[in-house]
Image (cartoon, rainbow, N blue to C red):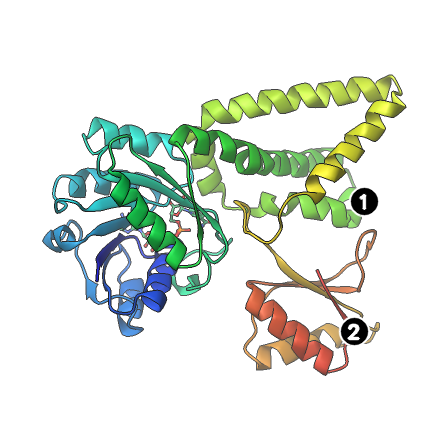
Amino acid sequence: MKTIGFVGLGLIGGSIAKSIRRVHPDWRLFAYNRSKESLAAALGEGIIDVVLEENDPRFSECDLIFLCAPVEVNLSHLKSLGSRIKPGAIMTDVGSVKGSIHEAARSLGLDHVFIGGHPMAGSERSGYAFSSDRLLENAYYILTPGGEVPVSAISDLTEIVSSIGAIPMVLTCQEHDFITAGVSHLPHLIASCLVNLVKQLDTEPYYMKMIAAGGFRDITRIASSSPEMWQQICLENRENISQVLDAYIRMLVQVRCQIDDRNQGYIYDLFESSREYRNSIDVRTSGPISKVYTIYVDLADEAGGIASIATVLATEGISIKNIGIIHNREYEQGVLKIEFYDPDSMAKGHALLTKRNYITYQG
Ligand code: NAD
């Protein structure tokens, strides 16, 4: 039996706590969070056993402490709790950039007790209310152990991560920050720049916005992410982001020259090589960019059609993230697109609408 402490019990902290409670019902879970509502809810649901105060002496009873608050709060708790944890205990965090917290751990002399962590799962929603004991299932969970952490502690944390259904992967913090710069941070920047470019180019009567099609919407979905979180990530991982941005800019300049030169072979190879590599990516696991769960429905053009579908779903308690008619269906089947928050809601919604004789397609 282990005792686990949490600082921050929001979307990620709450999801880890719920997952641990599901698979290790006898473990003791302690938590401190700034907002008392989430602590009361977690206590009431039996997810945590004890509510702690900030810097509570009972943190020193924990075998493992998860820092799941915003990055600067994690840094201050690493400092305040680090010197008081019990011998053999480990601290870990869940932040999206690992270099800065490892630097802090080293300068505080905590390199032997700190293992950085980054669960590659999330959602656009935040807070304990949206946490789930399945959020981390099949998601990579990167661990970046400090240089002096004993192997046995790394194995323990790896086992806990596996036990909650995530896929542990041990990397150095430098590897983590470079890899996520390429597959997560750069795509977010590209999506935001592309949206802003279209915003600049589009003039009245705003036809670009009106007909923005499936492809445009797909690659810019992540431009709706939290500005605070992405500002922080860009500032914290700026060296790696600059490096991959430079490589990307060089590639764009080259593409532009080849198009100007009408280099047919180059242009064909560009799309062929990207298609081949894209199709080889394993879609069964969650990556760093949160997934969408979408179905499409054929809908006759009748008054109240959307409202009927929304009502059918609502009466079964299925939450809809987004619902709307697709006027440009270049790459999609179905007239109505419905986005759900999680795979369970999507599956239930799909089954329910099919039972009601709607023609539906999974996204
Ligand atoms: P969240 O807002 O859902 O949760 C943060 C929690 O921290 C909230 O419950 C809040 O009340 C609490 N908190 C804020 N300030 C505090 C303080 N001073 N003391 C104690 N508690 C405090 O956010 P989240 O999405 O769970 O993100 C938490 C961490 O997870 C961040 O470091 C983020 O980088 C990382 N992360 C987020 C995602 C994602 O997609 N949301 C994915 C991976 C990692």
* Amino acid type, label 2: Ile
In this view, the residue in front, 130 or 82, is: 82
Q: In the shown orientation, is residue 242 left or right of residue 297?
A: left
| Quadrant into which the N terminus falls | bottom left
Residue 27 seen in render: yes
Q: Mark 2 points at which residue?
A: 359
Quarter occupied by residue 172 = top left
Helix, strand or loop at label 1? It is: helix
Compared with residue 170, is residue 119 higher up or lower down, i.e. above or below?
Answer: below
Q: How crowded is mark 2: few (under 14 residues within 10 Å), some or many (20 or more)?
A: some
Q: In the shown orientation, is residue 86 left or right of residue 157?
A: left
In this view, the residue in front, 107 or 201, is: 107
Q: In the shown orientation, is residue 286 left or right of residue 334?
A: left
Helix, strand or loop at label 2? It is: loop
Q: How many labels does the image show?
A: 2
Q: Which residue is drawn at 77% across and 77% down?
A: 358
In percent of width and height, residue 18 lies at 36, 64
In this view, the residue in front, 253 or 154, is: 154
* Amino acid type, label 1: Tyr
**Mark 2 and mark 1: span between their CA atoms?**
30 Å
Residue 68 seen in render: no
Question: Residue 207 bears which disc, if any?
Answer: 1
Q: Residue at x 80, y 34 (%)?
A: 272
